[in-house]
Each structure stands twice: as C-alpha cells, then as structure tokens.
Image (tube, helix red, strand yellow):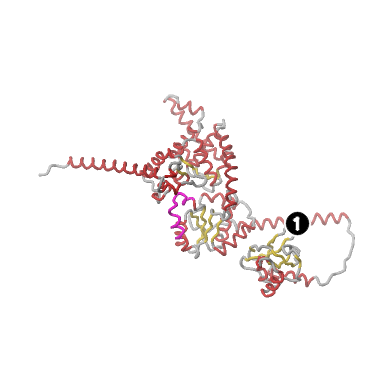
Amino acid sequence: MDKTRFNPGPELCPFDSVKWERLKGIWNCSDQELYHCLPNQYNIPGQICVKPNWVLKNYCPIYNTAAAKIDLIPCDSQYGACSNNDYRSNLVYMYSGCLNKTEILKETTTYTPPIVSFALPLHFIIIIIVAASLLLIFAGSIFFFCRRRKAKYYETGEYQLGQSEIPTGFQKTNDYLKSRVFTSSKFYEHAIGVLDVYRCITIVGPPGCGKTVTALQLASRKCGRGGKSQLYFCQTLEEVLTTAQENNDAYIIVDEFLDKYFYYPSTLDEAVESLNVICNELVIVVVDLICTNKRLLMAMNHVLDDGLTTILKYFFDNWSKDKDIKEKRSFCILVLAAFLGGEISPRNLSGHVTGPVFNRICCEFKCQSDESNTIENETEGKAKRNSNYECDELQSDKELFQTNLRLKSCLFRISRGQDDPLFVFQHSSLLRYVLVYVKKAKSDNFFIQNATLKVLLNNCWLEVGIIDQFLPGKEKTTLESPLGSVSLSTSATKSLVERIFSEVKDGYRIPDWEKHAFMNRKIFSDLWVKSTEAIQMQESGVNECASNTVRGNMPPTQ
C-alpha cells in the first residue's frame, strides 16, 4: 500500500489525541509529523502521509485527490468546534467541526431509498441546464464580490502607521495591493505560521518575485483595522533597535538592510549584538535579504546578470540613440532620476541645483534640439524669444513623464498631490542597472560630478588594482565590491575626494564617515588627509592675517 497516496478509511477520523496516536502508530509514516487523517473533496475520510501545511483560523484541511495536495475549506461551527488560531494540518483532530461532517453524513445515509427512473422531455432538460448555468454565474459573482471586499478589508486595508507615511519604495506596492484582489498562496500561508511562531521572518528571491508584496500583506494582517501593532519601516539595525525600544508592539519591515553595511562593514557586529538583546521579546521583523539556499540564489543571480544586463543595455542603447529628440530627453530624465537616488519630480528639471545637472546630462547625451542650439547662438536682441522657448521646452519635458511610454515603463507615479507628483523606479534593481550603464557609457568624472553624494556613498565602489592587493593594511578588507555597485577606477579617486570634500566643507554631514569603506582605501584616506590639512592651513593663515590686521589698528599704548 502506497501510504503517500490517499487511502479511504477508517469510517470516521478520531476527535481525540489517544485514538489519533493509535492510528498514527498503526499507519507508521516515515516521519510521524506526516500522518494525516482527514476527508477528501467528496467528504470521504482517509489516511495519508503528507507534509503538513498551515491552516488559517476558521478553516479546515481536506485532501484534494485530483490535485494531490491539501486544500482549505471554511469550517462550519454547526458540526463542532472550529479553530480560533492558525494551526498545522496534522492537528486537525483537535477541531471536531472539520471531521464531524463525515459522521453526520454516515448517519443520514443509512437508509437508501429506491431508485425511480423516469425520462424528461428534451426541452425541459435544456431549460434546467440553462437555469443551472445562470445560477452558477450568479453564485460566482457573489463569491467574487465577497472575496474582493474581504481582501480589501483584511489584506489590503489601511495600516496603523507608527510613522508619518509609507516610504516611497513601498508606496508603489501598496497602491498595487489597494487596486487588486488578494489571492492567498502556500508561501503566504506558511509565512503566516512562521511569523506567528518565531516573530521574525526572512523573505528572499530575485527582483520582482513578490517579496515586498508579501511583506505588506503580512503587515496588513497585523496592522490593519482591528490589529494591535503599528507598522514601521527601517533600513538599518540601529533604526530597528531604536524603534523597538520606543514601541512595545511594533511590526517592523527592514528592506535590504545589509546594503549599508557593505559600505560601513565595521558597524555590523555591534548592530547585530544590540539587536539580539530585544529580538526575542517584542519585535516582529520582516527582513528582505539573506538567502539560506546559496546555490539557488547564485543561480538566479547568474540568470539575472546575464539576461537582464544584456536586455537592458540593448534597451538603453536604442533609447539614448533614438533620432526623436523627445525620446532622447526622456532618457536624460531617467538618468537624472538615477543620479538623484531613484526619486524625481518634474520640478527637478528646473531646480536651482538639479536643473544644471539635467542640462549637463542633456549635453553629454546630445539631447538638445537643433532649435535650442540655434537660439543659444543668436544675438542679445532675441533674448526674450530664447526665454520663451526655454519655458516651452521645460513644459514639454514635464509632459514626458505622462506621455513617453519608455519612461513610464521605468518610472512609477506614487500617490502624492497633483501639483507636485513624485516618480520612483519600478524596482530598486532598475536604479542600479541605470547607474552602471551610465558609468560605463560615460567617464568616471562625469558620474562623480553629477550624481548626488548619497548615490556616491551608497552605490559606488573604488576598484582595487593588482598592486594594491599586495599592500599591507586595510586594503585586503575591501577587495570585492558589492553586487550591483558602480565601480570607479583608481584614477578617479582624486575627483571623488574633491567632490565629497567640497560638500562636507559646505556643511554636509556624513554619519560614521571614518568607518566608511572609502576610508579603508589608503589612496583615498591619504588624499582626504591632505585635503583636510590644506583647508586647515588656509583657515589658520586667514586667522593669522585677521589677527595682524586687528593688532595693527590698535591705538598705541600710553
């Protein structure tokens, strides 16, 4: 007898643990956790050795012999007790409402009435079939409507936020969930059980597989209407620690938290040690990174790197070299969005700081129209016409956000005000591909001078030459660059130092700057020290001159 296939019998599955354990011992599965006694889709009880699944509260497991899997059906309390919590399918004996139906069916089928055979007219049979079809359609419509209302209430409802708003990276997914009906899956049902038991779950997979969607669906279950928790979004373990200490019942989503520690490696051990103190007490954490199946993840990464990189390079090449000036300028808008860190608003095209960057991008990718070049060369007497043209061109560029199909396929408009819309990349991985493409297509200096400091610090990596690998000291800790980072040549180190130093000198503060991976590179740290010493000498010289001036203007002593 194949015990991995559904075998009808006994006449009734037991409701108590003693009889259940006796049947389990007689059936003797290879693993005792695999034993199940439950009805099939025809309400016939039977036994089978199968991996247990998580069952939602107020649901019962049945074995679908056609699909060869465990399915869930609503539990009817008129037959007995139903579960108030999620449970494993191999514990179904604890809930008589899931097994008692077979006993009632047995009692009601002890008497078999005589079979009466009679023939119906053909037209009457047709009427019955049509009526039954209409009834099924009506019942399906009601089920769909109820499922949709339930999904919007339970799985995609409004969250009880512990912070001011949902981050832009999650806003796109949240808008998606609000506009679509939630459909459960084995993965989601298993994630519910893991989260309830361990209060911490790790979701992994390639870009676009549904990690963020699942995280928000789980959040809706804990933080939706009627939930007790408040939803928080964090990016580092330090933020998790602070949030957990200030909020006793927080549901925290941490998205790609290891990205920071690639660039601040010395801070990871301290953060993990601090987090271990509170992780087992009150915090529920959903982390979107680490993969336990390293071979599977490596295989996925190879497919993505080889496939997506080739496809996107071909896509960007055709886009940037398109003869249509609007297509070229829409590509320049995409580059500006990447240089700004993945978020862009139409007002950035004419901003005090970002406007000149957009103009330099257009010049570099030759996105300026012939009419624009002609107007720039005209005399001062036509300055008014030039100004009017620039206004028209700017308005045309802003319209590209809504009209250009290529740009719309890369950028997503999140739910913000109509007067100042905000657009983000369809996926964070696409931002990295654009940055890498622009760096390879143009020079390192162009990238360094136009990307924001946030992009330079969190998405770039300094190459390590062959000679550097044999140098003693910190160089050995920074040989490998993170996957998807922009690799800058060693010759661009001076430009990188000057760019970062200029903004720091103007008041930009970089937390834990001394622990950043750039400072581990001896060539970078030496140039940084020289720049610091130069500015200190300059300031001391200015102070000395000022002191001498004051001393020279002092009245002579009596």
Q: Which residue is nearer to you in this view: 537 or 235?
A: 537
Residue at point 47%, 50% (across, down):
262
Q: Is residue 134 left or right of residue 453?
A: right
Q: Residue at x 83, y 55 (%)?
A: 127
Q: Identify the residue shown where x is 56% and y is 42%.
A: 410
Helix, strand or loop at label 1? It is: helix
Could you tell me residue 222's position as x and y percent?
A: 56, 61
Look at the picture and state if 217 lies above or below 396: below
Taking the image as drawn, is residue 75 in sight?
Answer: no
Residue 402 falls within the magenta-colored stretch? no
Residue 413 vs residue 107, the one in the foreground: 107
Q: Percent x, y for residue 266? A: 43, 53
- Within 10 angstroms of label 1, few (less than 14), some, or many (20 or more) residues? few
Residue occupied by mark 1 = 136
Query: Which range of residues does the magenta coloring cover?
Result: 259-274
Query: In terms of secondary structure, what is the magenta stretch mainly?
Result: helix
Q: Is residue 447 left or right of residue 505?
A: right
List the single residue furthest toward the bottom. 18
For the N terminus, the quadrant is bottom right
Q: How many marks?
A: 1
- Where is residue 61, by image quadrant? bottom right
What x and y, as percent, mark residue 228? Answer: 53, 63
Q: Is residue 544 above or below residue 42?
A: above
Picture coordinates of residue 502 (x, y %)?
37, 41
Q: Amino acid at mark 1?
A: Leu
Q: From the viewer's perspective, is residue 327 above or below residue 243?
A: above
User: Which quadrant: the C terminus?
Assistant: top left
